Image: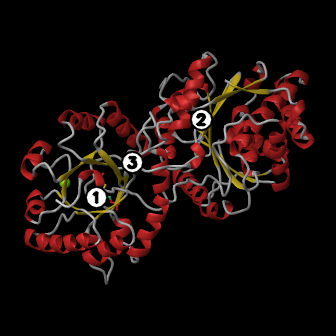
Amino acid sequence: MVFAKEDVDYSLYLVTDSGMLPEGTTLCSQVEAGLQNGVTLVQIREKETDTKLFIEEALEVKELCSKYNVPLIINDRIDVAMAIKADGVHVGQDDMPIPMVRDLVGPDMIIGWSVGKVSEVEQLAKWGPHLVDYIGIGTLFPTQTKKNAKKVPMGPQGAIEILDALEASNATWCRTVGIGGLHPDNIQRVLYQCTSTNGNRSLDGISLVSDIMASTDAAGSTRILRALIDNDIFKFGNDLKVGNNATPDVNAIHSVIEQVSQNRPLVQHVTNKVHQNFGANVTLALGSSPIMSEIESEVGELCRIPNATLLLNTGSVAPIEMVKSAVHAYNEAQRPIVFDPVGYSATTTRKSLNDSLLSYGQFSCIKGNSSEILGLSGLNSGSMRGVDADTSLNDASLLAQATKIVAFKFKTIAVCTGEVDYICDGTFGGAFQISKATDGASVDSLIVYTVQNGNIPIMGDITASGCSLGSTIASLIGGLSPEGSVFDAVVSAVLLYKSAGKNASLSCEGSGSFNVQLIDNLYQLFHENEPSKWSATVQKL
Ligand code: 3NM
Ligand code: MG
């Protein structure tokens, strides 16, 4: 045995499939290109190869792996692994039971297991430290690679459940890699989001097949993957800053408004029908340009317009492929997205639709009313009647806790609206690290801010008032200059909106004139830019 188990580097784990090799390449040439450029672990997974040829290929790959000092794992074929003295073996749920595998291979060989359920983690914990050495957590995202896939993609939130189960059952020895549909456009987000709730562990690496095996430039593809893993910061929006948790003072707010006035952001709204007109007017009142586009083919251009930002509101939903393209495009262009999961958990349809979008992207801010934030946090699932805020939900400590959980889970700035608004930054500055998560910083370490301005019940008597706070947040984040603070922008937006709402409520004669005066007040407060005069206040909870 060459490799001590604790020295194995799982960060970039290549699994082979000779069924997808581009012309002019071989199994060995692709693996070597990977090894030369940062692959740290190799698994031979050949489902269609006869034993004799399998052994020949395995011996060849073994020689390559030794040359680069990288361990070799064999998928499923325990006999082959033993015969060629591989470093380890990987088995799935339908393969030979783990205790039998361990009996056959002895104590030193690495054993990997494919895991997709919490109950499987509980099983491996019962077996104790000498059976399973690492697990492949999957399937994360849809993939064409695994034929007859039985598993439904679990997304980052599913992987978090598995990491939490490992922590809960104290399986500290067991290492983890994520697998399934991993590519350059999602691996940083996966490494960033997938942390156990106690902040103690994150994935030890990523495992993939097609991104390298099917690449016409396997060396280049591996270098890209390697750089993304090693460059341990998720970029939220060009050089925008996240994760500064100081209370923004009037100077910071003044500066946000000034940046927005100068930069005049483009706010693409993918939003519900009721909100479209009002949201466009709110955006214009804030010196920003609304575009209510749901055209899939133009998202790639829109997101590259300077200071473009996306408001994604799921109240009535544009074609799902369009929405996914928009999320993908804005994430790729490193432009901010504000997500408003309208009616989350009101129906199973809405829950699954919002969940699939949440697993599809990284959001700068997630804003919801108390029912939505509670639903997202998991503290209270399914207590929602419709898409309106449930005003009975105002237990302050429960809402503050839910806001923290949402911020941590989705590594975002969470805003929970109501008579009191709760704001929490769970971004950790965009930083991620393999294995070590947030170094033990957990939900409890996050700070919650409240924004208050007394009760403004008339807000609930006009339509799309909550949705338009989304427009306001999107304008202010989108309008930031490089190095601008996303957290300051979110707090500024909530203060501005609540101050304007209060002013309008005091001078209006009913809900119709409230509607008009809300826009007037947003316009005036924004253009005056004297936040010391705003009536809403922010406080650390
Ligand atoms: N195992 P690609 S998904 C080999 O879910 C494998 O356990 C999976 O291929 C699991 O990187 C998968 O091309 C295929 O998506 C991964
Ligand atoms: Mg198998």
Q: Position of residue 313 (x, y in %)?
A: 62, 42
Give the residue type at disc 1: Lys
Secondary structure beneath label 1: loop
Q: Quadrant of residue 506?
A: top right
Q: Which of labels 2 and 1 is toward the front?
A: 1
Marks 2 and 1, how far apart at CA: 34 Å
Instruction: Report whether 322 appears left or right of 422.
Output: left
Q: Which mark is residue 203?
A: 3
Please give the residue where the numbered disc 1 appears in the rendered image. Answer: 146
- Quarter holding ligand 1: bottom left
- Can residue 290 be seen by looking at this rendering? yes
Marks 3 and 2, how far apart at CA: 31 Å
Confirm or deny contact between disc 3 and disc 1 (CB under 8 A). Answer: no
Q: Residue at x 81, y 55 (%)?
A: 263
Marks 3 and 1, how far apart at CA: 21 Å
Q: Is mark 2 within 8 Å of ligand 1?
A: no
Q: Position of residue 480 (x, y in %)?
A: 75, 51
Instruction: Check the image and report above or below for 41 versus 198.
Output: below
Q: Which mark is residue 342?
A: 2
Q: Which mark is residue 528?
A: none
Give the residue type at disc 3: Leu
